[in-house]
Amino acid sequence: RSAREAARGPDRSALAALGFAMAEVLPSPLELEHVIGYTGHHHAVALCNPLDDTGYITCLGCFVVFEDATDPHKQEFLEAHDGEVSSLAVCGVGGLLASGQAGSARVASGDAPVVVWDLKSRERVYDLFALRGGVE
């Protein structure tokens, strides 16, 4: 088979001849309704959101998660870390959130970047480097 044919997936006729049936692939991606979970291996990884009366911020592995205490389906995941988030800090006055990680899984030196987020837009504002071993 050519590379293009291999990229399309297994040969259905060959599998059918062996007695295997294949389900049709749905055209739309799977969408999670909500995620239940909390890593909780570190201190200071659950905070109230100063800009939202019912909101709180926590972590789930390498994600920072904005959640609503009144609606478990209202979640927003921020992705920037390649290791477990080990610390969160918020500056309500400046509207910023800082998330630090336990150490990089990709870099042998154990870099532990801190990512600074805008609380309103939930966009990444700064990346701080040169920390080693983890942020607590």
Image (cartoon, grey):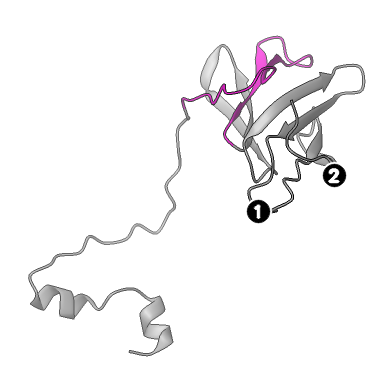
The quadrant in which the C terminus is found is top right
Residue 16: x, y in percent? 12, 74
The amino acid marked with disc number 1 is Arg
Q: Secondary structure at mark 1?
A: loop
State the residue position of label 1.
Answer: 106
State whether residue 48 is above or below residue 1: above
- Which is the main secondary structure of the residues drawn in magenta? loop
Task: Give the residues drawn in magenta, as a range.
Answer: 36-61
Distance, label 1 to label 2, CA atoms, is 14 Å
Residue 3 marker: none
Between disc 1 and disc 2, whose residue precedes?
1
Residue 21: x, y in percent? 14, 65
**Mark 1 Cα shell of 10 Å, populated few (<14), some (14-19), many (≥20):** few
Report which quarter residue 127 is drawn in: top right
State whether residue 3 is above or below residue 63: below
**Mark 2 Cα shell of 10 Å, populated few (<14), some (14-19), many (≥20):** few
User: Residue reaching furthest bottom?
Assistant: 2
Residue 129 marker: 2
Q: How many marks?
A: 2
Which residue: 76% across, 45% down?
A: 111
Position of 13 with respect to 30 (left or right) is: left
Residue 98: x, y in percent? 80, 29
Position of 128 with respect to 12 (left or right) is: right
Position of 27 with respect to 93 (left or right) is: left
Magenta stretch: residue 81 in it? no
The amino acid marked with disc number 2 is Phe
Residue 28: x, y in percent? 43, 54
State whether residue 83 is above or below residue 109: above
